Amino acid sequence: MEKLKSMIPTSIQRMISASTVEDLPSTCSSLVDFFLSLDHFHNVVKQLSDPEMALCRKDTVAAMDLKRKGNECFSGGDYAKALSFYSQALRFAPMNDDNDENRKLVATLYANRAFSLHKLGLLVECIRDCDRAVILSPCYAKAWYKRGRANASLQNYEDAMHDLNVAMNMELSLGGKNRIKDELEIISNHCQGTSGILYKCEEKKLGPFDGSVVNNKGSWGTIIRDHSLLVFGDAARSYESNLVTMLESYMAVESHVSHQIKLQCVSTPAKGRGMASLSDIPRATLIHTEEPYAAVVLKHCRETHCHFCLNVLPADTVPCPSCTIPLYCSQSCEGKAGGQRSWSRTNNNSINGSSSANIEGPNASTTRFGSNSESSVTDSNLEGVSEHRHECGGAHWAAILPSEIVLAGRVLAKSIERRRHSAVKPTEALDFSQNYARMSSDSKLEAHIYSSVLTYCLQQSYGAEFPLTEASVSKLVVLISQIKVNSMAVVHIKSQETYALQQTGKLSLTDDFSTNNIEQVISLSRWQYTLGLLQDAGMIGCHHFISRRPQPSPSYLDVYRILKYLKLCSGLTLAYSARLQPYLVSHSSASVEYRAIAQGTYKVRVGQAIYSIGSMLNHSCQPNINAYFLSRRLLIRSTEFVAAGYPLEISYGPQVGQWDVNKRHNLLEEQYSFNCQCTGCSEINLSDLVINAFSCPKAKCSGVVLGSRNLEHGKQEGSSSRSVPLICRLERPLPDDKLQRDEINEVAHILLHPSDGTHRAYPGHCLNCGSYSDLESSWTESTKSWSYVKRLTDAIISREVSIDILSNALKALNVLRSTMHAYNKDIALVCGISFQSFKVENTKSGESKLVPDWVEDNLAEAFCLIGDFQRALQHCKASIEILGKLYHEKHIVIANELVKLSSIQLSLGDRASAVENINRLKEIFSLYYGSHAAKIVPFLGSLHA
Ligand SMILES: C[S@@+](CC[C@H](N)C(=O)[O-])C[C@H]1O[C@@H](n2cnc3c(N)ncnc32)[C@H](O)[C@@H]1O
């Protein structure tokens, strides 16, 4: 694209740079004329849209080669790698209905993958792959046999007997028949011996990593099907009861949208249209939910998240039938996304009157065990329109162009298809605002280029319905600018935890164990399975796991790696960390202490989507509603009481307390091209005053010393025609502290009306007592101190925290405390804030990338890492205290800190305080997520003292 851009004549570039929406017909016309006469343009679009030149075409040779590699790995015992090769092979394998050879190849690949999944203990996934294999090849004995084995391990004896009987009938070899007979006998004996309820696995036959339950004590196993979890024994019971308790405790909070709440579109001069409710809304009310008009997975999640529902992919991914790019979590999602050609939808599973009529077909609404996504994606959003069909068939433009351009293509394709189906005008559903005039020259030019290219690509699917004319290109330019303003990032919540291991004061954990590939293999059921395994079988499970690793004698480091590898959910980790301790001590030369510290949640952007109502919500740096997502479904919940008619506003990212007003404005201007007019920005509030402020040099004075930057904002506000704003809004009382409301009001008055009073706000002077502070030297000192903090950050990231680095950081903290104001946000971060906030950086390719804004670089974290939980506790408390001043007391940031605090308290055996904090954090999580808190923050259910 860069080359194409550089070839555009300067005159056209200038014209585009100065254009408004009204000029688009002429700018697009000039550009289209130029492109049509340019060979390079024709080459580019041909490469992008011609299926014959596509890089993502199906390829039998590649599929066969990958299958061979998979077989080699399987024979060599590397099942994780084998799984990965078979999945790759499936992506390349042609899946057209009319070719028996292709059908056979795909069936074999699913069956082979099922064998690998079985070896890895992923039984539910194994069954799903067997289902797929028998749909394609109903007489495939191997697939029936493997499904029978997996069903037996899951205690589905009836299904297991049925599958094995079918396999027996189809198996041709005598040896094979005998093996199946043996299996049938074992199952039948177990069923008789246990009345078909209790199944004692024989470790010899069904070893832990032969895909069966490690349960050599003969204890109970449980499967919680509706949550797609596989938990065994005590783990299952405790998980189940926690889940029930959690769900019960949230019953009080409604779990569906209140019918009384009717939203209406309102308009204000400052922000344009927005949404408000016709009636009062109590806090924590679910106000609205909706499926996207169109959505797209972000590029960095393509290999890890379902391209339709956006959930994390399981190990048994389903590829697109017609190209090699999209991956789905199930055939149901694949069917909804709608590639060009799919396998026949007939269910061939009625062989021998099969009772296992659970074979997943795209028409089936759920699989037997349910996939995490199935239940959350409704059919109502489909309206007969498939999202991927126009991109499919082998052309790779959708894989190359930036996500927001692909999203624009999807929106347009949907409107064309809707028109085909119901005579709706293509523009009718797209009544969104745009900010074209405020876009930078570069963005305008890029929008023009991408629109021309996309028009050409879409033309391949829609021909005369979307011809390559300036009208089409201009429509797309507007659409792209609408998407820039109105699309929402689909964000999923993740939890995180730190493992702490102490060995003679210094911690040195260089993690050479690459988890990346394996992580993709591990699904939730696998974590739970292994967790159940560890808990149920105690250390035996751990031994088994470790014995699979190359090291002859497992050490504490192995356990650390395993925990990291498994990414166990923090609460449960806490629960069984005590069990690991004796193991760790007995297996390492030095005394080792192990603790797990829950770190709360952080957000990950997985997709970009357009919502009919959600995209109309305006922004506020002090939002009164929370937007969150289940799969790709948007949910809106009030986080405070909102009076009828009062605007409902989400945060597009920045919030009061997180950044000062200037930073917030810059970000909103850069990313969304508007100048924020929210209440949080038009009022002066405590956190904006102190967030970057210095302390008063006079002892015992808690006044604020502002730098010139803080004052600049005040002057800006003062120069506007606004009157002195009310500082303390009714619904948001400031914390009752030394800095009283009167004082804030007074400061605001001074800032906004400098000539009115006797006081003047000068940089470097305390607003309370007027004492002068040398900000120049404060800056120098604090800059030096930050460098020590930075070193601590690096040490934590590399897991190499030494006493020296830590003590220097502590000294730096003291300096910072004496120069910066007590409520300075950065000090809170140093003290112990652990939430990871992410900012979006735009790379050169125009694709957004997530980078950590502030990693867990703090003292509480560092003290956890070296095992000094007492001091970690102090710093964590200090952090919460400061954050309490900057945010309102029920802010999600506080909840995240409380997770860590209660986790440390549990580690220290202070149960009473932990319970108090756990209750506080649960209250906050339920305010933000209501009845979905248990689903979104799964560790809540198990975080109990
Ligand atoms: C997603 S749209 C919201 C709906 C939009 N107001 C409309 O009329 O269609 C985002 C746009 O609304 C306006 N907007 C939203 N929040 C704002 C705020 N806090 N201050 C000023 N303008 C805002 C900006 O023009 C922004 O580009």
Image (spheres, rainbow, N blue to C red):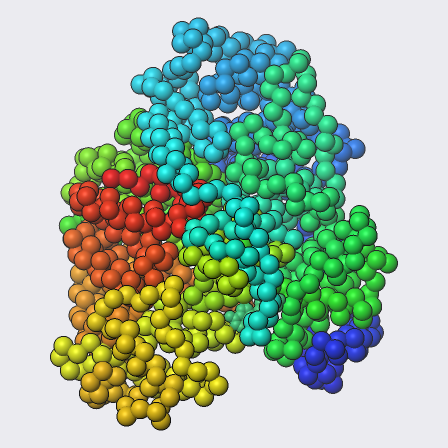
Q: Which residue is at a point 34% across and 56% down the rendered structure image?
A: 890
Relative to residue 455, is residue 696 depicted above or below?
below
Residue 226 can be seen in this image? yes
Q: Which residue is at a point 32% across and 27% down the rendered structure image?
A: 234
Picture coordinates of residue 294, whole percent (x, y): 65, 53
Q: Nearer the viewer, residue 27 or 734?
A: 734
**Residue 322 as seen in the image, left or right of residue 124:** right
The picture quadrant for ligand 1 comes to bottom right
Relative to residue 26, is residue 88 depicted above or below?
above
Image quarter in which the N terminus is found:
bottom right
Image quarter in which the C terminus is found:
top left
**Residue 243 as seen in the image, left or right of residue 821:** right
Residue 509 can be seen in this image? no
**Residue 724 as seen in the image, left or right of residue 263:** left
Picture coordinates of residue 5, whole percent (x, y): 68, 75
Q: Nearer the viewer, residue 429 or 565?
A: 429
Q: Which residue is at a point 45% across and 11% down the rendered structure image?
A: 196
Report how many numbered discs are placed on residues in the image: 0
Picture coordinates of residue 306, whole percent (x, y): 57, 45
**Residue 141 as seen in the image, left or right of residue 783:** right
Q: Nearer the viewer, residue 224 or 807?
A: 224
Q: Which residue is at a point 22% across and 82% down the rendered structure image?
A: 768
* Image quarter of residue 694: bottom left
Picture coordinates of residue 535, whole percent (x, y): 31, 30
Please identify the residue farthest to the left as the structure is shown. 699
